[in-house]
Image (tube, grey):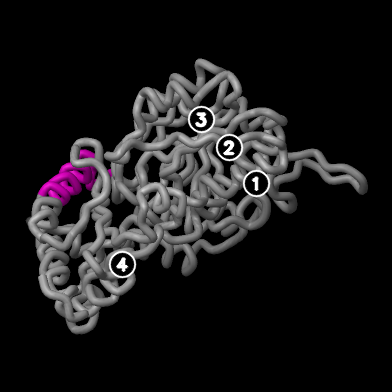
Amino acid sequence: MSNNYVNDFPILQKTMNGKRLVYLDNGATTQKPLSVINAVQEYYASFNANPHRGAYELSVKATQIYEDAREKVRKFLGAEKTSEIIFTKNATESLNLLAYSYGMTFINPGDEIVISIAEHHSNIVPWQQVAKAKGATLQYLYVNEAGLLTDEEIEKKISSRTKIVAVTQVSNVLGIINPIEKIVHKAHSVGAVVIVDGAQSVPHFSVDVKVLDVDFLVFSGHKMLAPMGVGVLYGKEQLLDKMPPFLSGGDMIEYVWEQDTSFAPLPAKFEAGTQNVGGVLGLSAAIDYVEKVGFSNIEQIEKELIHYAIPKLQQLPFITLYGCEDLSKKTGVISFNVKDIHPHDVSSILDADGVAIRAGHHCAHPLMQYLGVNATCRASFYFYNTREDVDALINALGRVRGVLGYGS
């Protein structure tokens, strides 16, 4: 199953260790198409200036580029207003903004914050800090043996004491798609707000914040073809209005006196300092590229790849797979281990064959502990991957145990 998308990505034309690069670490970051690279290069070559600050032509142009990108993100997510789109440097910063601005302000002693055991550390550690500081309790939704959040767990753990539910839409370890609609319905029924980590979902399928009725959603641009250093926080306007600024400084103020300050309206209130305009333009170009490919194609390609890959992995007697077997509940993420071999060694040996996968705890220590493992290997696909990439992974895995002196 070859596709022509590979030709748009210069790095995918490279060789590694004399072998064709097979890049299967898209859950960590995606590669960048030439259109995104060119957009960023053109900005710095032709339009670079500080937005919102100058009355001269370059600054006006930079401001227009920045705000046009905000409107593109608004449409992309289905948000109602551009004031609900806040640019950050990544999903991690967006989650910290929510923890320290919303959490520290509105969480009280005895309240509960509900997260899932499958969260990335970025959606665990900030809430631990809020709970400790405010005398609240951190409550976990536990997945079943297949890695799924059940209706029973959602009903049991989200209660009248719950004030915040912060969950990933897709697990970065297992690729499992969580039932966000059910979680939102239950949370709202008890008056809690819902924060969704969309870092692993927004790049892979259409996400409409109004349809989901989430209160906040975050994602990172670099996991969706954009440059590193740009992320998004979506929030309902009435909630963002009530929240104090996260960072203070230039461009987030209305007026400053010697002893006091009035703050700018949304979205500027949360965008202190000079922003990453080049990265934001890169995100805009990435959205254009993704929409050109189309989410229906992206989903189809990823489904075909995991339907092709998983049976081949299951045929290898030394492979242990993690997560549910119902592939309709998964994106293109596969976690596995090789018998007797540490994932770091597996990754190093595969690298010698030009195959790049992730190995380790994937910033998800609690999930690793829950699964009873220290680490896993992870192959994560995107639409520019092919069956030939899967074959290269399988062939390289066939060598791993032999390299370290084990039999099959």
Q: Earlier in the sequence, mark 1 or mark 3?
A: 1
Q: Nearer the viewer, residue 351 or 298?
A: 351
Please tell me the numbered disc located at residue 345: none
Who's the residue at 58% across and 33% down the image? 113
Q: Residue furthest bottom?
A: 18
Contact flag, marks 2 and 4 (Cβ < 8 Å): no
Callout 3 secondary element? strand
Picture coordinates of residue 281 (x, y %)? 45, 54
Query: Which part of the image, by quadrant, shows the C terminus?
Result: bottom left
Mark 2 crowd level (few <14, some 14–19, many ≥20, 10 Å Cα): some
Q: Residue furthest right?
A: 258
Picture coordinates of residue 396 (x, y %)? 15, 71
CA separation, marks 2 and 1?
A: 10 Å
The segment highlighted magenta reads 291-307
Q: Earlier in the sequence, mark 4 or mark 1?
A: 1
Callout 4 secondary element? helix
Is residue 74 visible in the rendered image? The answer is yes
CA separation, marks 2 and 4?
A: 31 Å
Callout 2 secondary element? strand
Q: Nearer the viewer, residue 382 or 195?
A: 195
Three-letter amino acid code at the position of disc 1 = Gln
Who's the residue at 60% across and 27% down the image? 163
The residue singled out by tag 2 in the image is 138
Three-letter amino acid code at the position of disc 4 = Pro
Q: Earlier in the sequence, mark 4 or mark 3?
A: 3
Is residue 404 one of those drawn in magenta?
no
Please tell me the numbered disc located at residue 129: 1
Residue 399's quadrant in the figure?
Answer: bottom left
Q: Earlier in the sequence, mark 2 or mark 1?
A: 1
The residue singled out by tag 4 in the image is 343
